[in-house]
Image (tube, grey):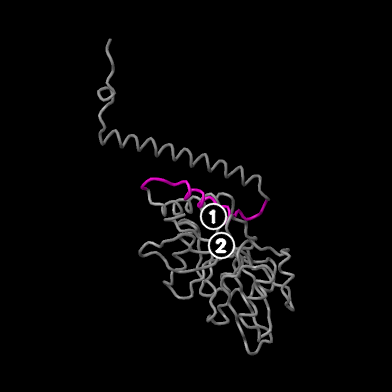
Amino acid sequence: MSRSNPDIDQPPVTLESLRAKLDGIDDSIHDLLMTRALVVEEVGALGAKGRVALRPGREADIIRRLLRRHTGKLPRRVLPRLWRELFAATTAMQGPYVIAVCEVQPGSGFVAAAREHFGMLTPMRTHRSPAQALAEVSAGTATVAVLPMPAEEEAAGTAWWTALLHRDEPRIHVVARLPFWSPRAEGSSTARALVVSAVPPDPSQHDRSLIGLELPLDMSRARLASAMADAGFSVGGTILRRDPYDPMALVLVDVDGLVNDTDPRLTRLATSRRPVVLGAYAVPVDGDTQ
């Protein structure tokens, strides 16, 4: 009785056979991408007609889930890059998708950050002021605007977040933060930005929210921190703007979790005007460890 020898029966591994195997894998990946696009079409058909197909919270959760299950030598930081391009393509399938970017100084990195996050093929318009980029979102000519991260020392004309306190219609919300993943590769944009849209943020499993307040000019940071803690908020950063010609100080507070307009903690803050929830963003990930 003859016995087969696996080492003899198996054809030798050659460069050609490995390339053929890779071709088969590429075809399978392509088939799955086309299948995913069909499912996205079904999702779009079930969604509200005319609503912007923007789900930054869900996109963040997808990337987090993939990073948790990832193994092998393929660098983890590749996954967010690949899926961001995929998200951009499938979002564009569901309706107009235009990005307005505020880049006050040419070469400051905001266009590069927007390209990295929203895809190389997504239509993008550049503006020299936050007000111009916000105006595009308000007019419906842009889906989102990419704006510089608020800073305490910024000039009044660039403190775009103060405009969101007025709750104008359509109401503009913060919906994402850039960059979404780190570490940054050498040569990558180092710009830090917030993304705003005329749709409310959708929740992810790990969010932070931005709350705007009007407070007396003599309000100290210590008193503010104490009031926020007493109301039940876990506070991160705080920006306090005092204008000597304005009787009230404007405050931007970054807090843990997803906060909406009906959150009962807002009523516990003793302010002359009800706090305004400016939006929320999914907490960025470390692509090498998460």
- In the rendered structure, the answer to whether residue 11 lies left or right of residue 188 reads left
Q: Which residue is mark 1?
A: 60
Say whether marks 1 and 2 touch (CB < 8 Å).
Answer: yes
Residue 141 or residue 190, whichever sits in front = 190
Give how far across and how far down residue 103 sits, in percent: 48, 72
- Which disc is residue 281 wearing? none
- In the rendered structure, the answer to whether residue 126 lies left or right of residue 228 reads left
Picture quadrant of residue 236: bottom right
Q: Which amino acid does the dot numbered 2 rest on?
A: Ala
Q: Which amino acid does the dot numbered 1 rest on?
A: Ala
Give how far across and how far down residue 73 sits, in percent: 36, 47
Q: Is residue 7 magenta?
A: no
Sort mark 2 into few (<14), some (14-19) or many (20+) by Cα contacts within 10 Å. Answer: many
Q: Which residue is mark 2?
A: 176
Where is 150 relative to 2, above or below? below
Q: Quadrant of the N terminus?
A: top left
Compute the Cα span from label 1 to label 2: 9 Å
Picture quadrant of residue 120: bottom left
